[in-house]
Each structure stands twice: as C-alpha cells, then as structure tokens.
C-alpha cells in the first residue's frame, strides 16, 4: 500500500510517501536558495511528493537565519533551478509558504516581528550572535492583516512562476496562521480575534486568496491542532479546528496536511470532515513503515516523513527493500554546507 500510486488533484504520484517540510537554513542572506538546494531536493525526487522547507512570502514573514523567500525575482529564479532539477529527476514538488509571525528577532530580519497581538512568546531563537530571547512583536493593524493575506497570494503566484507544482500554506507549528487561531497569541478585538469564528478568519481568507490566484487543486494547507510550538495555547482545539476544517473543505483544496494531535477523537473528526486528499504526519511513531501503514489503513491517502527523508535520499527504495536506514545527524540539520545536507549515502548495487 505505501508504494501504490495516487492521483493528487490531477498530479500523478508514484507512491504514498511525502517528504515533509523541514527547515534547513542554507539559503543565501538575500533569501535565494543556495547552490546546493537544487541537488538536495533532486536527490529526494523518488518521494511521491516533496514539500519544501518553509518559504517566507515577504521580508516581514522571515523568522530564522538563512531561510529562503518567494518575494523577489531573484528568489524566483533560484527556485526555478530547484524545480527544474526535481522535475528532471522525475519528481513532484510543492513550496510551503510560511510566515513566521511573532517567531523572529531583529538580528535575523532587521526589524521587530509582527504578530496578531503584541504578546511576547516564551523561549529563544538562534541569531548570528547566538541564542536570544524572543521580542514582543508589533501588532498587525487590520490593514496590515489584509495586506499579509495578499502577500501569501503573491508568493503563491511566484511559486507557480518558479515551476512548483503547487503550494502548501503553513498553518501549523506555532507560526502566523496558527497564531491567529490560538487563545494566547491572538487577543485582538477586531473581526480577526475573539470568537472561534473570528480567529479562523485569517486562515480562511488567506487560503481563499491563494485559491483565487492559482486554483484550488494547487493548494494544500498544514494544520497541527493543539501543537504548543511557539508558546501557543489551544485549549479549545475541539471547537476551533472542526470549524476551520469545515470552512476549508468548502474551498475544494488539493489536500489537507494534518499533524496528528494527541486527541484521537479530534483526528477522526477532522478526517470525517475533510472531503479531499489527506496527508498525515504522526511524530509519535518512530518507525517509518509502521507510521505509513497505520495511517493508510485508517484512511489517510498519503503519509509525510521528515528526518527519514532528510537522512535517506532514496527512502522509498530502502523501505521497499527493507534496507537499513541512515540516521539523521542533527548537528548539521540547521545551516552549514553540504555535510549533513547532500552527502547522505544512497544504496548501490553492492549494498542491496
């Protein structure tokens, strides 16, 4: 079953294994993908689908050092080299559009980050001078919220220009879209805050704007109900996520990428509400084959894997053969050169 083909909104996938988005922090300082990025993704083209690391839709959306963007012509040209390399290797690739929101630091971006409200998250972030405490973000005005929606749509159009097969909106892991959903990061009193209906508005309007720009079949969204990353609180996840998923379902997106929550009841409710392709990522299960099989048997269409793809460019082949997997070197996960990036070994005729 993991190796059976699947049609994702018209895109033919050779297997059900998705390379999950993973920040690698190897872009040039101007947000252009590095010269190694095309090789890194092309090496992993045997995945059913590749979803890139988070790509900022604007300079204000940048959170971490050396992350790539999709808001300048030079960045588009850099990504075109990546998509050309992946397609030449027979792969399929979506760009994950990620606005970090309040997760950032002036040492990384040159300015204070923006968030739904002026609430400083607990924790620290890596900067060129080492770990620094998060700063209190500037609160987005209503007009800035609406212009940020358009930043996502513009970045999606640039992704298509760069040759991507589609885009995934990052609504998970503590970043801007999820910040609007949360109870402690969003204290707004306009129509983007307060009730669950208002707190889902930014996610829905952003998704609708992207759909209007590039078409629903090219759009997916990633959600992580109850994920406390970025110091978020979502005590009402059983209320807010079914409401959000119901609104998103009406937009006829290509897929929903669900990071499974701790609540099996909520996972099942979301799965029931969602009518189109479902990608599941379950960090609670270590063994890739077990993770994939479990969720496919429960009705997921595709399963995403992170560190297994990071360390195994030929992961589908290794899993098919039952071969030993390379182990990820986390000392080189964020930033650096080719080491721990493009030098993981692949199977050869002598090793199978």
Image: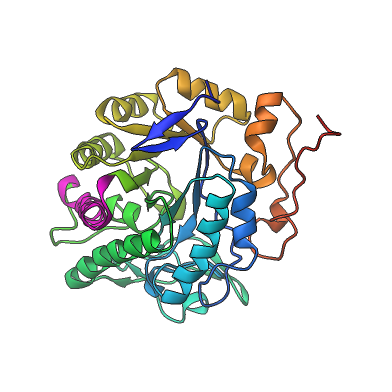
Location of residue 255 by image quarter? top left
Is residue 330 or residue 231 the one in the foreground?
330
- Identity of the residue furthest to the bottom in this view: 110
Whole-percent x and y of residue 298? 42, 19
Residue 34 in the magenta stretch? The answer is no
- Identity of the residue furthest to the front in this view: 88
Task: Point out the stretch of residues depicted in magenta.
Answer: 196-216
Residue 215 in the magenta stretch? The answer is yes
- Identity of the residue furthest to the top in this view: 297
Q: Is residue 119 visible?
A: yes
- The relative height of residue 341 versus residue 140 in the rendered view (above or below) is above
Location of residue 24 by image quarter? bottom right
Is residue 271 or residue 193 the one in the foreground?
271
Is residue 236 or residue 142 the one in the foreground?
142
Name the residue at 57% across, 68% down: 27
Q: On the rendered structure, is 262 left or right of 126? A: left
Name the residue at 61% across, 46% down: 44
The type of colouring in the image is: rainbow
Q: On the rendered structure, is 190 left or right of 293? A: left
Is residue 89 or residue 267 the one in the foreground?
89
- Identity of the residue furthest to the right in this view: 350
Q: Is residue 116 visible?
A: no
Whole-percent x and y of residue 340? 72, 55
Q: On the rendered structure, is 352 left or right of 248? A: right
Whole-percent x and y of residue 186? 27, 58
- The relative height of residue 137 versus residue 11 in the rendered view (above or below) is below
Whole-percent x and y of residue 209? 22, 57
Q: For the stretch drawn in magenta, what is the main secondary structure?
A: helix
Count the marks: 0
Name the residue at 80% across, 29% down: 352
- The relative height of residue 211 versus residue 319 in the rendered view (above or below) is below
């Amino acid at each position: 079953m993991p190796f059976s083909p699947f049609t994702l909104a018209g895109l033919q996938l050779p297997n059900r294994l998705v390379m999950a988005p993973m920040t690698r922090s190897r872009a040039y300082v101007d947000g252009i993908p590095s010269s190694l990025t095309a090789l890194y993704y092309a090496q992993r083209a045997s995945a059913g689908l590749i979803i890139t690391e988070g790509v900022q839709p604007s300079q204000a959306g940048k959170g971490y050092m050396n992350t790539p963007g999709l808001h300048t012509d030079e960045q588009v040209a850099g990504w075109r080299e990546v998509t050309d390399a992946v397609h030449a290797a027979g792969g399929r690739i979506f760009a994950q559009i990620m606005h970090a929101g309040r997760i950032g630091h002036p040492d990384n971006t040159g300015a204070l980050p923006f968030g739904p409200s002026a609430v400083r998250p607990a924790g620290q972030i890596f900067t060129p001078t080492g770990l620094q405490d998060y700063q209190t973000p500037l609160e987005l005005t209503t007009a800035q919220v609406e212009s940020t929606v358009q930043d996502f749509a513009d970045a999606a159009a640039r992704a298509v220009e760069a040759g991507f097969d589609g885009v995934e909106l990052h609504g998970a892991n503590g970043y801007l879209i999820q910040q609007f959903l949360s109870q402690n990061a969003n204290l707004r009193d306009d129509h983007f805050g307060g009730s669950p209906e208002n707190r889902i508005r930014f996610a829905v309007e952003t998704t609708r704007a992207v759909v209007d720009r590039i078409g629903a079949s090219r759009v997916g969204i990633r959600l992580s109900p109850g994920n406390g990353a970025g110091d978020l609180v979502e005590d009402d996840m059983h209320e807010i996520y079914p409401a959000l998923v119901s609104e998103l379902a009406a937009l006829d997106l290509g897929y929903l990428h669900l990071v499974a929550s701790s609540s099996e009841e909520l996972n099942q409710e979301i799965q029931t509400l969602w009518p189109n392709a479902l990608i599941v990522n379950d960090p609670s299960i270590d063994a890739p084959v077990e993770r994939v099989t479990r969720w496919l048997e429960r009705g997921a269409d595709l399963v995403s894997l992170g560190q297994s793809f990071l360390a195994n460019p030929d992961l589908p082949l290794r899993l098919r053969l039952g071969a030993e997997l390379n182990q990820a070197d986390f000392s080189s996960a964020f930033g650096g050169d080719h080491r721990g990036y493009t030098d993981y070994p692949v199977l050869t005729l002598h090793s199978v």
